[in-house]
Amino acid sequence: MDDFSLPPNTTTHNLASIFSEVDPHVLQPHPRNSSIYGKDEDVTELVNLIRHTQSVSPLVITSEGIIISGHRRWQAVLQLGWKRVPVEVRNFPDKIAELQTLLLENANRLKTREQKVREGQAWLEVESNAAKKRMSEAGKKSAPGKPDREEDKGMENFPYLCLSSTKGTTRDRLAKRVGLGSGRTYSKAAKVVEFIDQQTSLGHQEIARELRQVLNSKSVDAAYQFFKESKKKDSDRGAYPRGLLPTVDCSITDSKSCNQIAKSCWNCQHRLESVDNQSIYCNKSGVINLINKSGDERGRECPDWRYKYSPAEPLKNPTFALQLLLPLEWQDKLEETAALLDTDAATWVKNLIGANLFPKWSLDTIPDLKTGQSCSLSG
């Protein structure tokens, strides 16, 4: 690829634009474009349109020839074999200003839910940087007489669109910015996208591809349910939390021969979700720390160990269903608090009630908590 250079006798000042024509082969895509909007987009229709009209809107590029806006148009003219393409050359004070312009220039394009989440992540980066600059500017105002830096002068012409200017939680503001409904919906979609990236990095392309299809073609809720089921399958296959890998081989060849199975917390039906990277939750013993003693050691010593594929143990305590009608404004906070403990809202409320009803009892002796059964909870 040839080096990009502006036409002779041209200069740029701050954000003043220069309109020109350049060879499209010397331009380069912005690295953040593919990470947000993906690679290998289908531009067939755009190619046909440009071939018919023989015109294209100018691409927005930096003075170094990096494309900020117009990646699809650029791909189209390359396919058409154009030798020159119209461009608008702008100067940007920093990489964050480039990123913000890239997002704004793509504001009206049709996007998948995955792309909206990735836009939200980029907007959060823009806002975080803007917050730092506001603090820096406040510090400069308190120190009169200090000369402005050259890059700060450029920033005066580049207004950041601050998420903090709108009300609500961060996820609510991000959801509104990218058009993903509520903050709760955005949070679910973000977890799905994070899992897609995780599976891709692990080489599980089929899972990532299927989950991406559910997210983009069905709904966020459907994708979130798929995500939870996939995580559970990973756990059943032995995908242990980081730092808690078993020290012995717990592979099972005959699920009916429980007397030949190596006892471990990892293959016990009383094990629930991991609390953190050091602990798990057990229906029998409550929170178990695995730093000083591994899950395999505890499993071998535990009198209540029961193979996870064995028939469920009969409940020792009768249960009842309880419906709680809580204020709607509690819902997000309740779910966030429960999520921090890696559990669901109903289980967290049940445990909270049990701890207050039986403060002098150990977790192992609280009725109902031993059974691991959840009451009905709606908000």
Image (cartoon, rainbow, N blue to C red):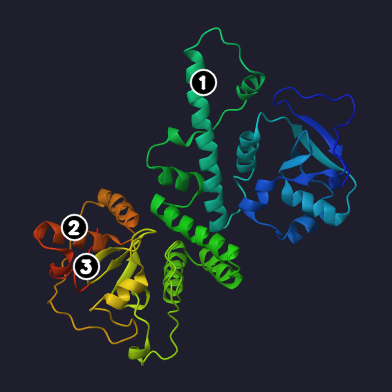
Q: Label 1's element?
A: helix
Give the number of the disc on residue 352: 2
Three-letter code, disc 2: Leu
Q: Which of 212 and 52 is in front in this view?
A: 212
Rendered view: 166 above or below 341: above
Q: Where is residue 62 in the image (x, y as percent from the top left)?
A: 74, 35
Q: Nearer the viewer, mark 2 or mark 1?
A: 2
List the residue tagged with mark 3.
376
Residue pictured at 49% horizontal, 44% vertical:
177
Q: Label 2's element?
A: helix
Q: Which of 240 and 30 is in front in this view?
A: 240
Badge 3 local density, few (<14 within 10 Å), some, or many (20+)? few
Q: Nearer the viewer, mark 1 or mark 3?
A: 1
Q: Distance between the residues labelled 2 and 3?
A: 15 Å
First-in-chain label (2 vs 3): 2
List the residue tagged with mark 1.
137
Residue pictured at 44% horizontal, 32% vertical:
165
Q: Where is residue 255 in the image (x, y as percent from the top left)?
A: 39, 89
Q: Nearer the viewer, mark 2 or mark 3?
A: 2
Residues tagged 1 and 3 counted as in contact (Cβ below 8 A): no
Three-letter code, disc 1: Glu
Q: Distance between the residues labelled 2 and 1?
A: 46 Å
Q: Nearer the viewer, residue 204 or 34?
A: 204
Three-letter code, disc 3: Ser
Residue pictured at 38% horizontal, 37% vertical:
167
Q: Label 3's element?
A: loop
Q: In which quarter of the image is residue 287?
A: bottom left
Residues tagged 2 and 3 counted as in contact (Cβ below 8 A): no
Rendered view: 364 above or below 81: below
How many numbered marks, from 0 up?
3
Horizontal side, residue 70 vs residue 322: left or right: right
